[in-house]
Amino acid sequence: MKKMLLILSYIILSNNSLFGQDQIYKAISDSEFKLYRDIVSTLKDTSFIVYPLIEKHISSSMLDIPELIQKYGFNREQFRKSAIDDVFIIKNNSSFNAINPDSIDSYQNYKEANDTLIFEPFLYAIKKHYHKSAVCYFNKLLLSKNKKFAIAEYFISCGNLCGYGATVLMKKKKDKWIIIKYLTHSIS
């Protein structure tokens, strides 16, 4: 009985999650990368490193959805999604640095060699390994039907009750995305 429970547990775990480098992430498209790059270029504070995994949709509860649909060409379905089916990845590049995704799990429970308990292990590890004091998180962006407008959301976390972010409406002009409107702001 005990052996059967162990086998069953192993099967459930191996089907529901992948461990370490076995995890496969979808790469963001070139146009999405350009949009994220253009957001980063507008930020004056560069003391952060980019969190490479995009795991959530934008939070639409505070958005004027009817205006976004009517004026900018989004559709209602885009705002109804509650979970992302896939995890997307932003890779390191010349515009900004991203955390190595293989190190994220080890950074979550980071301890010094002497097993010292660290209050915020993830940020401590980021500071130690990347010499950055904050992490910038992006949510999955929304593109309008005609691909001329986008809604993007970011948050820069520098610790417990320390951070800021925004949901922005962007417009593509030539080959550059520019912020045309701040839809929400968040501060902790």
Image (cartoon, rainbow, N blue to C red):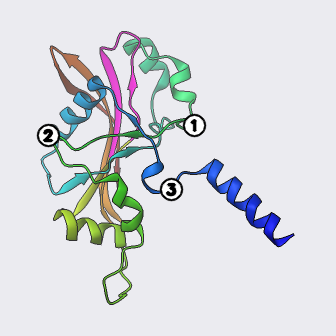
| Residue located at (56% from left, 38% from top) | 83
Q: Which residue is mark 1?
A: 82
Which class describes the residues within 10 Å of circle 1: few (<14), some (14-19), or many (20+)? Answer: few
Compute the Cα span from label 2 to label 1.
30 Å
From what the image shows, is residue 113 above or below residue 24? Answer: below
**Residue 53 visible to an observer of this rendering:** yes
Q: Earlier in the sequence, mark 2 or mark 1?
A: 1
Label 1: element kind: loop
Q: Which residues are magenta?
A: 139-154
Q: Which residue is mark 2?
A: 95
Residue most extreme to the top: 146
**Which amino acid lies under the numbered mark 2 shown in the image of this protein?**
Ser
Label 3: element kind: loop
Which class describes the residues within 10 Å of circle 2: few (<14), some (14-19), or many (20+)? Answer: few
| Residue located at (30% from left, 67% from top) | 123
Q: Nearer the viewer, mark 2 or mark 3?
A: 3
Q: Is the C terminus in the top left, top right, bottom left or bottom right quadrant?
A: bottom left
User: Looking at the image, which is closer to me, 61 or 130?
Assistant: 130
| Residue located at (15% from left, 13% from top) | 174
Compute the Cα span from label 2 to label 3.
29 Å
Q: Which residue is mark 3?
A: 19
| Residue located at (26% from left, 65% from top) | 126
Kindly check if marks 2 and 1 are in contact, taking CB atoms under 8 A apart as contact.
no
Q: Is the N terminus in the top left, top right, bottom left or bottom right quadrant?
A: bottom right
Q: Is residue 115 left or right of residue 33?
A: right
Question: For residue 151, which quarter of the picture?
Answer: top left
